[in-house]
Image: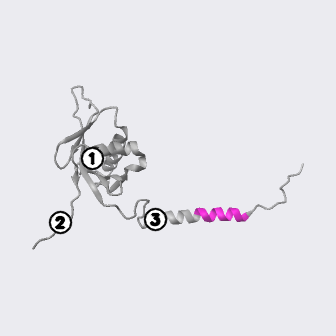
Amino acid sequence: MSEPFANVPFPTVPLRAAAGLVIFSVAITAAARIFGLTAGSGVDSPVRAERDLRFVEHQIGDAGVSAGGIDVIDANTGHKIDELRPGGDGFIRATLRGLARERKRRGLGPEVPFRLAQHADGRLTLEDPAISRTIELEAFGSTNSGAFARLLAAAPPVMAAAPQAHTP
């Protein structure tokens, strides 16, 4: 039996085009990292409302085990605005766990509060100033971003300061 394509050369044009596309993609990605460009690095929308939050795990009980609850504290007033009960609020807990892990990796503690912000364009972001990271919460869907939105609406949020007129 003979091979039907034994004497047919391999088409090199598509192979070269694919290799060029891979090289171009790697070069663009490297340039974006070098110059600090990210998908959300466009013009930032002004903040409409924001709140600095601390998340405090419940104290360890008599059995030496945490009950698993987390108090949500307004960092500016010190008032408890919500409680994340054990077995619930999975998205909030997972998000905080990731940020806390990064803080721990860098040798940082919980001293600096997180900043939850609602922007004029409707975006909701969670910023961790301690590690200079901002999470665009809408990227995870309306149900997940809504879990954080309730923390902003739990009590009157701190409104972004409006420019004040200067009087001599």
Amino acid bearing label 1: Leu
Q: Give how far across and how far down residue 142 sits, in percent.
A: 40, 45
114 shown above or below 63? below
Whether label 1 touches label 2, CB < 8 Å:
no
Residue at horizontal 62%, vertical 65%? 20
Going by the image, does 168 lie left or right of 18? left
Residue at horizontal 42%, vertical 61%? 38
Real-space Cα distance between discs 3 and 2? 38 Å
Going by the image, does 71 lie left or right of 166? right
Looking at the image, tell me whether mark 1 or mark 3 is earlier in sequence order: 3
Please tell me whether residue 40 belongs to the stretch shown in magenta: no
Mark 1 crowd level (few <14, some 14–19, many ≥20, 10 Å Cα): many
Amino acid bearing label 2: Gln
**Mark 1 — residue?**
152
**Mark 2 — residue?**
164
**Mark 3 — residue?**
32
Question: Element under label 2?
Answer: loop
Q: Which residues lie in the magenta part? A: 12-22
Q: Chief secondary structure of the magenta span?
A: helix
Question: Element under label 1?
Answer: helix
In-front residue for pair 78/164:
164
Look at the image and tell me in which quarter the C terminus lies: bottom left
Amino acid bearing label 3: Ala
Residue that lies at the very extreme toward the left in this rendered image: 168
Question: Element under label 3?
Answer: helix
